[in-house]
Amino acid sequence: LMEHLVKKERSGYDNESFSNRIVQFEGHGNSYNCKPDIFTYNTLISIAANAGRPEVAEETLEKMAKKSAAGDFSVKPDKTTFNTVISAWARSKTHSSGDKAAGVIHLMQKMADEGDESVRPDRISLTSVMNSLISSAKRSRNAPLQAEDIIQRMEQSKDSHLQPDTVTYTSLIKCWGQKGGLKAAERAEKIIDTLHKRYDDGYIECKPDSYAYNVALDTIAKSGVGDAAERAEAVLNRMKNLFNSGKTDLAPTTESFAKSGV
């Protein structure tokens, strides 16, 4: 049955029939004294995620949580469980994907704060939520603010593995870019400043690069503000000056000039 689910993960199953298949699998397992464990459930969640069914993935997570709360610790959700569900929502690109992914990570944080350090969100968790917020930013006015909250939480973390890096900050710019407007242009400029400051302060994972600048240029150019061209040109000039001073990671590309309109 597991093989059948894998083969059919992208077929025409609706959520109800897909869930029924999981229940069927559980029944077969119990009949043969082969009780589903954490690995089994994580595999089922992964199949649901790959099939584009984040609702089923989250339903399975909730079922695991209930079973473990009732004393069946063999199916207690672990970090992989949560991260796979978050990734499922991030890939779904539905109007509620950002809120749903943020809800899962808040549950992880709550469980960790209550003593279960094994499920404390890691960089994978937070980056996946950021990606889901990018997908929903055009439809959700709160998405960029939720992304800012996640970044702030990462910056305040004492765990070096949770500190935001260049990829994380670039994702934040993308999130604002999906939103557009003056605030997006201003935040794109400010986030580039933040990357430079953090790198100068010793956070080597925040080294600015051409891609981050290009995303910022794109955000500014598409912001719709009256002085977008002047703002973009200023960012491009900063990029060129830094490259000329020896910052080889900031070499302007064809895309840089195209996005700035210069």
Image (cartoon, rainbow, N blue to C red):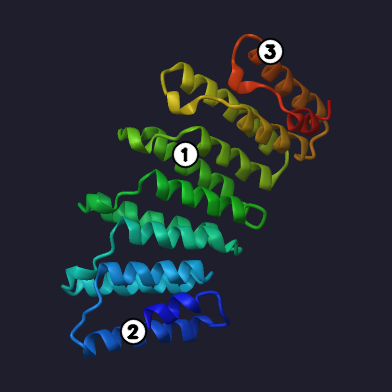
The residue wearing badge 2 is 25
The residue wearing badge 3 is 241
- Where is residue 4? Give x, y as percent: 43, 81
Confirm whether residue 42 shows in the render: yes
* Secondary element type, mark 2: helix
In the figure, is residue 4 to the left or right of 95? left
Q: Amino acid at mark 2?
A: Phe
Question: Against 50, is 228 above or below?
Answer: above
Q: How many numbered badges does the structure rendering display?
A: 3
Q: Amino acid at mark 3?
A: Asn
Residue at 39% in and 34% down: 163
The residue wearing badge 1 is 151
Question: Against 182, is 25 above or below?
Answer: below
Residue at 42% in and 24% down: 203
| Number of the front mark, 3 or 1 | 3
* Secondary element type, mark 3: helix
